[in-house]
Amino acid sequence: MIRRNNIYGFLWLALLFLSSCSTTRKLGENQFLYKGDKIVIEPSNDLEETPNIEAIDQYVIPEPNRKFLKLVPIKLWFYNLAGDSVPSKGFRNWMKNKLGEPPVIHKSYYVETSKKEISSALNNQGFFNHSIQEELKKRGKKVKILYKISVEDPFLVDTLIYPEVADSLTLYLSRARAKSIIKSGQIYNLDVLKAERNRLVTYLKNNGFYFASPNYLLFKADTLSTERNHMDLVLDAKSAMPNDARYQYRINNVLVYHDFVSSKSEPYDTIQQGDLKHIFIKEPVVKPKVISRSVFFKKGHLYNENDYRLTLQKLTNLNVFKFVNIKIDKDTSSVNQKLLNVSIFLNSALPKSLSAEVEAVSKSNDYVGPGLTLSYLERNLYQSASSLQFNVSSNYETQFNQSKRNINSFEVGTDVEVTIPKLLIPFVNSDRLGSKKFRPETSITAGYSYSGMTDIFNLHSLDLSFGYNWQETKTKTHELDLVSLNYTHINTKSDWADIYDYIDESLQEQFILGLKYTFTFNDQHLKSKFINTYFSASSEFAGNTLSLLHSAFNFGKDYEDRPSEIFGTAYSQYAKFDGDLRLYHSFSRKSKIVGRVAAGVAIPYGNSEYMPYNKQFYTGGASSLRAFPSRSVGPGSYVAPESLQNTIGLEQAGDIKLEANLEYRFDLISYLKGAMFVDAGNVWLLHKNEELEGGEFSFSNFTDQIAVGTGLGLRLDASFFVLRLDVAFPIRNPYPINGKNWVLDQVDFGSSRWRKDNLVFNIAFGYPF
């Protein structure tokens, strides 16, 4: 973290300067700068429902000039600053045409076009009886358009009428009626009608109607046979619907082409694997039985759109093919039956690859630095679509934090991971186990690393794991590490780490054998939802198996006052639970609000008195409480003694964590985005520790120990790369200072001393959550 004394003064001076620059001085005599619009709904009576203004406003043209921080039209300012006679290249050309944008001039036809679009949008929402009046609000050379919309009662749906059952098509339409999203008494809405039509077509396609399309169905509105402002909706098939769309089709031949080029005249071979016929010139890259696990078309079965989607998804996710293409054709050789032939074309990717990645690393503990990773990838072990990845990595990091002494860290390591595209379960044939519900994988990993912190400790770490991960749906994933083993050997440790007993214990040589399960729900790809959700929860248990073995065979315990050991090393025993909930709501394409709550509890027991160092909770830092340096908050109301004020804060960790964040994000210009945020939280100990006074958790006073900070942020977001700068300051301490926790009344941006002591700069890569 970096502190700067004059940053706020500079920003305010810059904003004042930009806002004082005229944006209309270059306009012609009869030209007016368009400043946007305002829509006012004037209902003719007390309406329970009124039109959605946000949905209407998107049809108003044009868009006014964009503003920095919603205040200053900085792009227009740059455009004017570049001048009129701009060379064909160079800095002024770049400023005018890339950095700047021309003024948006008001034109009368914009109003007429907007009124037509607004009228159409009102009709789509069921407000057919309406009138629109515009009013130009001029102020100097600027104009804003006020649209006054008078609306009467919207039209309501009385009855949704389906066609009488006369054939297979009308039969299935009738069956789909029970789950209709159009209900009697709801306001007419064109978007709902479109959604219902898409739902019906999806249902038809999942029941054999391969040629069904939304374009072949329509809703007719009947207002004559109903009372005023009511309508019946009649579902019907268009007269232009082709005959093929009225019939159900079944699967006939399923052909799989392996790196097959039809234009070549070379002889080819075939293999029949169940319902699949594999066609190839050279031996298939992937064994046919592996492909069969990922293909869901069955000969003789009705065509199902879900089978098509799952087959494409599973074959693609094998990660051994560069292209996967599925072609479905009508079988013209059969006269009396309605059949389809499925052709699956597989083009193999390069089987092996070697890559090097140089990256800039930022972590939640405020460490920033360069990293290098060399990777070797074998995509298709033994023609099974299993992958092997071997990595060698190194990184060097330092903390940018003036409030603590300079701490550097390093890490070098290697790891290997084998991923198998099915669940490896002893004595169980899992080839088709749950294949339609989730995408299963078995993961086996092994790794070694050597790492350390300046003048604190150096350690060797060995990791082994065996587990499963599977995607249940597009939004739900599961990870289960059946065996997770970690052995840590402390090579050197400074006397400083022995100041507290529990730090010394947490940094001891340790052996961790456990089990971990993680569930993740993420629907951020569903852009149409009002609120998108990310939720992750995990539970981890360690040491129980070794404890049971010790109890059964009485091994590893030489002294009653010492923990049990395995291979001469004490093993850790604990349970750990944590969760992370994030909610995203987009106000528009250019702004959103994000809320996050994270909580966790870790319980050492049995063979462990304290949690291992790398399993503890801590807070503060670039992705946590940004107004506080990493490991500078807690536990509870604990205050570090003056002798430790500038250290890394190893003692400021806990067994319980509670954290909440609220962040408003908005676009500024081009790739530059802004944010305003509030963070709150702390960590606590499960049990009282005399060395850390006030660190234990208590339901009666934990809310008094919540730290709160707020601030502003800038993000350079190029999609594939995000550089983040957050400036924050505390407004509430977890412990009282002069009898008060809240320090809002002490905020003084004009004081250099206050800025030096309180402003905290966080530099990181990626969004905090």
Image (spheres, rainbow, N blue to C red):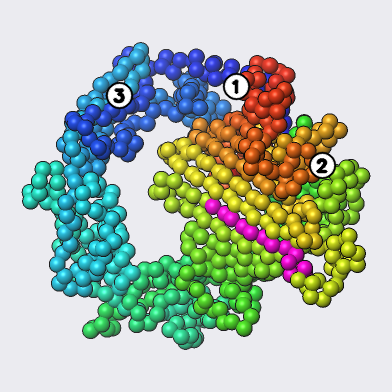
Label 2 environment density (alpha carbons within 10 Å; few <14, some 14–19, many ≥20): few
Q: CA distance from mark 1 to mark 2?
A: 46 Å
Residue wearing tag 2: 690
Say which residue appears at 84% left-offset and 68% top-offset.
566
Residue 399: image location, x then y, percent: 76, 39
Between disc 3 and disc 2, whose residue precedes? 3
Magenta range is 535-547
Which numbered dot is residue 145? 3
Whole-percent x, y for residue 487 in the image: 80, 62
Q: Is residue 367 visible?
A: no
What residue is shown with label 1?
11
Q: Answer whether labels 1 and 2 touch (C-beta < 8 Å).
A: no
Looking at the image, residue 136 lies above or below residue 623: above
Q: Quadrant of the C terminus?
A: top right
Query: Residue 221: x and y, percent?
Result: 15, 51
Q: Quadrant of residue 390?
A: bottom right
- Could you say which is closer to the camera, residue 686 or residue 530? 686
User: In the rendered structure, which disc, 3 or 1, sits on the residue that comes first in sequence?
Assistant: 1
**Residue ID at (24%, 58%):** 215
